[in-house]
Image (cartoon, rainbow, N blue to C red):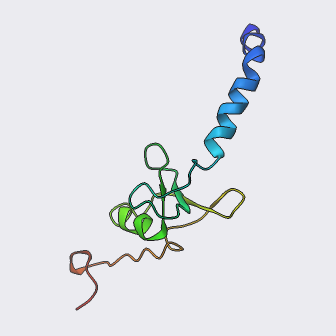
Amino acid sequence: NSYLWEWLPHKQTYLSVMLDMEAPPTPRVCISCGGDGIYRCTDCAHQPVFCMACCRNQHTLQPFHCVQQWNATFFKDSSLRLARLVLHLGHGGEPCP
């Protein structure tokens, strides 16, 4: 159909944007503390980058967000459990007394 033919001249632009979205920000620093940003949340707006401690703190009330961890080459799917997030059920979200 004609839509595909209209899009073809723009394919390199789309590819560049998609690759830019996968690359880490430069510099790759935590948006909260300025530390080493090794986690990226794919559910938060603008996919912010966090250090482990800030990722854990920011997601205490959002434990089902999906995160990725930087492995020196690319962001790999990870989990908040690996960022050491612990959910306390009961006692108002606090550890058992």
Q: Quadrant of residue 87?
A: bottom left
Q: Quadrant of residue 10?
A: top right
Reply above or below: 1 against 31: above
The image shows residue 41 at horizontal and vertical percentages of: 50, 55
Q: How many marks?
A: 0
The image shows residue 51 at horizontal and vertical percentages of: 48, 65
Name which residue lies at 78% across and 17% down: 8
Name which residue lies at 37% across and 62% down: 58
Quadrant of the image containing the C terminus: bottom left
Q: Is residue 22 left or right of residue 36?
A: right
Q: Is residue 77 left or right of residue 93?
A: right
Reply above or below: 43 against 20: below
Q: Is residue 50 left or right of residue 59?
A: right
The image shows residue 53 at horizontal and vertical percentages of: 43, 71
Quadrant of the image containing the N terminus: top right
Name which residue lies at 67% across and 64% down: 71
The image shows residue 9 at horizontal and vertical percentages of: 77, 14
Q: Nearer the viewer, residue 29 or 75?
A: 29
